[in-house]
């Protein structure tokens, strides 16, 4: 009974810490999707062309590109926790600035600042959660960040609908972000630093204290020894990222994150009201209201993803997810070609969004947060996130322009979705061939996997 009580206490401790860290994921979802509800009004107020519509959305993603570049230094030097605090500061600056913007260019500047916060948060939060989580809970706990992201997306849609009126309505959409930012700042004041970062800085007593609260004294001591042993085997330099074993892990992480952004479903979420409006649904709040089933579905499927990640293999779930996403895009393309009723557009959007949040969305973050050795994890995540946000920026910037080109050339945008279907099919093939299974392994055991693969590759080449 005492052991059971102690286990419950430890679980509550871990859940409370992860809940705070995942507010960064909430802000990621809210900050990027609140623009979907505001865009129809921004288009009118700022007289936006298709290119400027893309810029209004992608300016935040462009800011996210700087997150990995400066976040690398901050996560390594000042820690994962303080980097999340810095992200919160950028979020607050963006919140106030966006709400009071008076033109597209100053609006884009404040959105850029929020993007910097996104880049910092989405680099530090998954690392922090992965490094603090017990191995048997890591997949589920990293997915809490995804759940928080999706809750942020849904609340952004609700806020968008509530404030979907002319005048200052869209400004209140952005101002509403101040509430979760304040909660994040308060929560960060009480949670501990990552034990693996503490160990890397030689603060072993502090690391052991945190690990003991998470895993109990016996497991904590064994885990700290494994961490120390791995740290002695690594230099932590950028050069180490390009050693054969880790180089392959880096390649898998980069490609997986690029696929997570260029698969087309993200564009459905970012531009959902606009897509539905162009399909024939009334502009403004009606389009926002019609998009709520899509956002509500991704919340439900994200919750369903918890038992699926716990029960099934990471790799198998990932492959099934991207195949179903491809099917959704094919249905969307046929729908646009055949000019089916406007509301039918929701069906392929629901298929794509549901499949994405059941597999690729959570698993891309779970896998990249755990496949790299401790000492190079921050550097590897910086590289991975840089490619992620580059892909996201390019897709968000050119999606309305590409859609507009297909509309002008072929009178419908089906070609865009045929492209996305092909990308998802390629992602399925890549996942089958290249992505390893990491379920249930400690971070140190995963590191051993890449070192062993490196040795096998060297022997094969030598033979």
Image: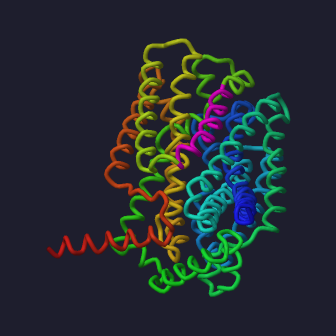
- Residue 398 appearing in the image: yes
Residue 8 placed where, x, y %? 73, 59
Residue 302 sits inside the magenta stretch: yes
Q: In this view, does 240 lie to the left or right of 213?
A: left
Would you place residue 318 above or below residue 243 in this image?
above
Would you place residue 265 above or below residue 450 in this image?
above
- Residue 408 appearing in the image: no
Residue shown at the point (61%, 60%) measured from the top left: 126
- Quadrant in which the N terminus appears: bottom right
- What colour scheme was applied to this rendering of the protein? rainbow
Near-viewer residue (10 or 120): 10
Near-viewer residue (181 or 39): 181
- Quadrant in which the C terminus appears: bottom left
Q: Is residue 44 left or right of residue 275?
A: right
**Main SS class of the magenta portion in the image:** helix
Residue shown at the point (63%, 62%) measured from the top left: 129
The magenta stretch is 291-310
Residue 211 placed where, x, y %? 66, 74
Residue 119 sits inside the magenta stretch: no
Would you place residue 97 above or below residue 453 in this image?
above
Quarter of the image for residue 428 reads top left
Residue shown at the point (67%, 52%) measured from the top left: 25
Q: How many labels does the image show?
A: 0
Q: Is residue 75 left or right of residue 90?
A: left
Residue shown at the point (40%, 36%) measured from the top left: 323
Near-viewer residue (303 or 321): 303
Residue 360 placed where, x, y %? 49, 45
Q: Residue furthest front?
A: 1
Residue 246 placed where, x, y %? 39, 70
């Amino acid at each position: 009974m005492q052991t059971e009580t102690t286990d419950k206490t430890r679980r509550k401790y871990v859940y409370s810490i992860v809940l705070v860290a995942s507010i960064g994921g909430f802000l990621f979802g809210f900050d990027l999707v609140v623009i979907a509800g505001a865009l129809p009004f921004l288009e009118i107020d700022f007289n936006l062309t298709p290119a400027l519509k893309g810029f209004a959305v992608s300016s935040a993603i462009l800011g996210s590109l700087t997150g990995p570049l400066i976040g690398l230094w901050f996560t390594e030097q000042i820690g994962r926790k303080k980097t999340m605090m810095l992200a919160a500061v950028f979020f607050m600056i963006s919140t106030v600035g966006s709400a009071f913007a008076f033109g597209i260019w100053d609006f884009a500047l404040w959105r850029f600042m929020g993007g910097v916060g996104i880049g910092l948060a989405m680099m530090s939060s998954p690392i922090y959660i992965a490094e603090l989580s017990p191995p048997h809970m890591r997949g589920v706990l990293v997915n809490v960040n995804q759940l928080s992201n999706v809750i942020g997306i849904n609340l952004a849609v609700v806020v968008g609908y509530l404030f979907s009126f002319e005048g200052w309505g869209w400004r209140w959409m952005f101002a509403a972000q101040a509430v979760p930012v304040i909660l994040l700042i308060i929560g960060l004041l009480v949670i501990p630093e990552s034990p693996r970062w503490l160990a890397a800085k030689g603060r072993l007593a502090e690391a052991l204290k945190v690990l003991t609260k998470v895993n109990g004294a016996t497991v904590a001591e064994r885990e700290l020894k494994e961490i120390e042993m791995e740290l002695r085997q690594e230099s932590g330099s950028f050069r180490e990222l390009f050693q054969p074993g880790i180089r392959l892990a880096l390649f898998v992480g980069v490609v997986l994150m690029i696929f997570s952004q260029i698969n087309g479903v993200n564009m459905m979420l970012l531009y959902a009201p606009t897509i539905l409006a162009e399909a024939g649904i009334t502009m403004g709040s009606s389009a926002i209201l019609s998009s709520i089933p899509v956002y509500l579905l991704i919340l439900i499927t994200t919750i369903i993803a918890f038992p699926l990640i716990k029960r099934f293999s990471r790799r198998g779930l990932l492959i099934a997810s991207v195949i179903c996403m491809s099917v959704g895009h094919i249905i969307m393309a046929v729908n646009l070609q055949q000019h089916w009723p406007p509301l039918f557009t929701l069906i392929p959007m629901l298929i794509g969004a549901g499949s994405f949040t059941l597999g690729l969305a959570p698993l891309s973050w779970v896998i990249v947060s755990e496949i790299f050795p401790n000492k190079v994890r921050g550097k590897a995540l910086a590289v991975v996130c840089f490619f992620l946000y580059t892909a996201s920026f390019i897709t968000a910037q050119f999606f309305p322009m590409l859609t507009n080109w297909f509309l002008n050339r072929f009178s419908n945008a089906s070609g865009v979705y045929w492209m996305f279907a092909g990308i998802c099919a390629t992602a399925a093939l890549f996942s089958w061939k290249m992505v390893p299974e990491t379920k249930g392994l400690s971070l140190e055991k995963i590191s051993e996997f890449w070192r062993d693969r490196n040795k096998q590759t060297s022997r094969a080449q030598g033979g």
